[in-house]
Amino acid sequence: MGKRIVVDTSTGGLDYYPFHHDIKILRIKVFIEDQGYLDGSELKADEFYSILRERPELIPRTSQPSIGDVIEFFENLYQEGYDEFYVTTISSKLSGTHNVIKLASEELKDKMNIHVFDTLTVCFSEGLFALDAEKMVKEGKTFAEIDQHLEEKRKHNTIFFAVDSLSYLVKNGRLSNAQAFVGKLLKIKPILQVQETGHIVSIEKIRNIKNALSSIASKVNAYANGRPFDAYILYTGNPKLKAHFIETLKTELGLENLYEAPSTPVVGAHIGPDVIGVGIFLK
């Protein structure tokens, strides 16, 4: 024993990351009607968004893993020879998964060490925390050293994204029907931000999606405030919207060849197939 392994949740998008990693993924379920699918292994992003396009009346739901599921997950890894785990999770402000893993770590503390880190973010930004942690584990860094690095990283990142259709925010209870009616009437395209607190907040409402994407570019510039940064594009199931955003970032910020990270089904279930955004990490 004594080996360490990094564990991430399926919301981090590492199923689609094109480079090798050994990160174990705790999968969250997506329910389409009465059928449950494990995000990333039983249901991929492109298939999920195709289903939403074909059947717009569907209201997909998600279910965080139970404490029993999490205990079984770690017990299986223990049987493989691991007893120390550094776990990065989706923001505890957006999902109860973080707290379930914490509870499981208490149940299992007599036989294994499960150290849980709250990234306070979601999508591929969350996955980048896991990739950093895995690299540091392989370098022999202590969990305290990894914490110190990730806590600093956590202070200097954000996500800006635009929602072209409000319907899924309504279906999943994130927006009232009255607000949605007004939004559709005025063609409002809200711009949202994942903030340092781990919450997602609406920061601007614009009536045209092209103007919304241009506004995101301006917000990226203001957030960086002259500092160098790394960025990636996050998207759901709208290739035309993604293509326009790529051109916007190139024209207005000079950003090219960014990694394009699909939002996983468990994220897309809440925001729908018409979302585009950018994740930023200040250097």
Image (tube, grey):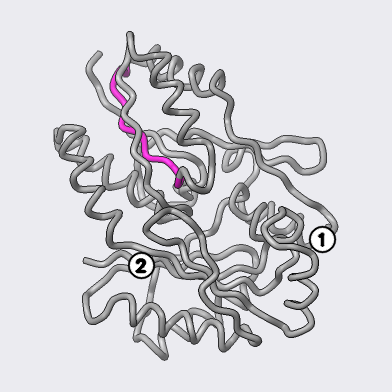
Quadrant of the snapshot with the N terminus: top left
Kind of residue at badge 1: Pro
Residue under numbered circle 2 = 280
For the point 47% across and 86% down, the residue is: 248
Badge 2 marks a residue whose secondary structure is strand
Q: Nearer the viewer, residue 277 or 238?
A: 277
Residue under numbered circle 1 = 56
Quadrant of the snapshot with the C terminus: bottom left
Rendered location of residue 182, percent (x, y): 77, 78
Q: Counting residues from the N terminus, which is met first, the one under dot 2 or under dot 1?
A: 1
Q: Residues within 10 Å of mark 2 (few under 14, many from 20)?
A: some
Rendered location of residue 192, percent (x, y): 53, 69
Q: Residue 242: which disc?
A: none
Q: Is residue 49 left or right of residue 225?
A: right
Q: Is residue 18 magenta?
A: no
For the point 46% across and 52% down, the residue is: 122
Find the distance from the CA under tag 2 to the CA under tag 1. 31 Å
Which corner quadrant of the image does residue 169 belong to?
bottom right
- In the image, which residues are magenta? 82-91
Tell me how many marks there are: 2
Badge 1 marks a residue whose secondary structure is loop
Rendered location of residue 78, percent (x, y): 38, 15
